[in-house]
Amino acid sequence: MNLILSDNPLNGLKRKENVHFIDLSALKIANCIGCFGCWTKTPGRCVIRDDAVKVYPLIAKSDHIIYVSRVKYGGYDTIMKTMLERSIPIQQAFIRLHHNETHHVQRDVAPKKATIIAYGDIDKGEKEIFRQLIARNAYNMNFQSYSVVFTEQDALVKTVENEVKKWNV
Amino acid sequence: MERVMILNGSPRAPKSNSKRYAEIFTENCRIQTEYFNITKTNHESLCAKMKDVSNVLFVFPLYADGLPVTLLSFLKFLEENPPETRPVISILVNCGFIEYQQNHTALKMMQLFCSKNGYTFGSALEIGSGEAILSTPFKWLVKRKIKKLATSIIEKKYRIYGVTMPISKNMFIRASTQYWINYAKKNGVTKEEMASMKIE
Ligand SMILES: Cc1cc2nc3c(=O)[nH]c(=O)nc-3n(C[C@H](O)[C@H](O)[C@H](O)COP(=O)(O)O)c2cc1C
């Protein structure tokens, strides 16, 4: 599966039949409440039954994925971060060694070629923190390979289209 | 006034590990502390209180390698509603994995928030194996570090501390597997069910 997960509508984006597009800002997604129900009560299912439960199965299935997010304090801004926190049902409670660090065992999650398109007014130091974040995410979110692309909001649609082209799908 | 305002940024603050870490901080801090959970509705009153304190300590869990949304939302509000006099900001962050270094990106994010908004960043304590360490014989190691954290804040000798269980990673994995099996057992869920590969 090929997926674009965006924190804004990306108006004007050329749509492709085999590329699934999700605008998170149009969905109703509550904060994770840290209850660990998805690991210990209903494994693989979040107890909060809102729109997030339609999104994390698609993240799990995708082998090509683009995350589009505004950057805040060197991390994802609220919309994307909320979705990522709600995505822990796709992992198990159990921990394994991965790159010589402890990380969770993944459920049925496809290894990913990920592109993170980060936008906003981001200076050099903030970019560095964001890159470190993505390097950490790569271990926890099953990235096989990834690239980080910084851009301005005005150039987002074009940037996303460019990255999709590279998939050759 | 010389006081530490402790703000809990865990989304499950009333029942959180962060709350227990905050309690240990209070027990080991020579100056007065005031504790609050960050909720969706109290941002304004917390920001208003901040002008009266010399120090703020954020206690929070690592969530998806970064700041939990509960804390992020509060910081964004604080950015728009800063107190007239800025307290020194310190942090106590805990994560589930054994490597306390996995908290480092979150620490950098908090330092960035401070430098962008004119706050002095004080001290930090990064805790690994934070979900379980307080229920193990290693609790005293945490207490010792929290005491150092408190002293460094009061004496303005700011430092970055880290602590975790002093066991091998493989031993940690075995212990955590047992921890989660027991956790789920209380809900009547078996190890096999927990290990389901199915999503939704
Ligand atoms: C949505 C979510 C995301 C988490 N992400 C991480 C993580 O990236 N790394 C980690 O080591 N622990 C992670 N944890 C584990 C928590 O940091 C750990 O359980 C912590 O002790 C919770 O603290 P609290 O009780 O104060 O909220 C995560 C937990 C949840 C619920």
Image (spheres, coloured by chain):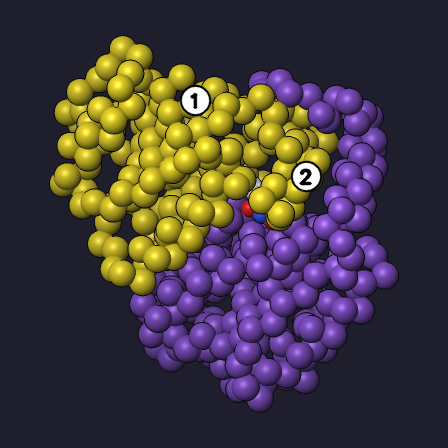
B137 or B151: nearer the eye?
Answer: B137
Residue A76 location, x and y as percent? 38, 46
Tell which of B9 and B84 is nearer to you.
B9
| Residue A58 appears in the rendering | yes
Residue sitting at x 37%, y 28%: A65
User: Label 2 belongs to which residue?
Assistant: A96
Q: Residue at x 47, y 20 (%)?
A: A61
- For this orientation, the residue located farthest to the right is B137
Q: Residue B46 at x, y = what percent?
A: 48, 64
Which amino acid type is marked by label 1? Ser
Farthest top residue in view: A17
Looking at the image, is B188 positioned above or below residue A32? above
Q: Chain of mark 2?
A: A
Q: Which residue is mark 1?
A: A62
Say if B97 sits above or below B181 in the image.
Answer: below
- The quarter of the displayed image where residue B134 is located: bottom right
Q: Colour of chain B?
A: purple
Q: Amino acid at mark 2?
A: Arg
Same chain letter for marks 1 and 2:
yes
Between label 1 and label 2, give the one nearer the viewer: 2
Q: Going by the image, does B82 lie left or right of B130?
A: left
Residue B13 in view: no
Estimate the x, y position of residue B88 in percent, counting from the top left: 46, 77
Helix, strand or loop status at disc 1: loop
Residue drawn at x 45%, y 25% is A59
Instruction: Tell me if mark 1 has few (under 14), some (14-19) or many (20+) residues whose alpha carbon lies within 10 angstroms of its own.
Output: many
Q: Secondary structure at mark 2?
A: strand
Say which colour chain A has: yellow
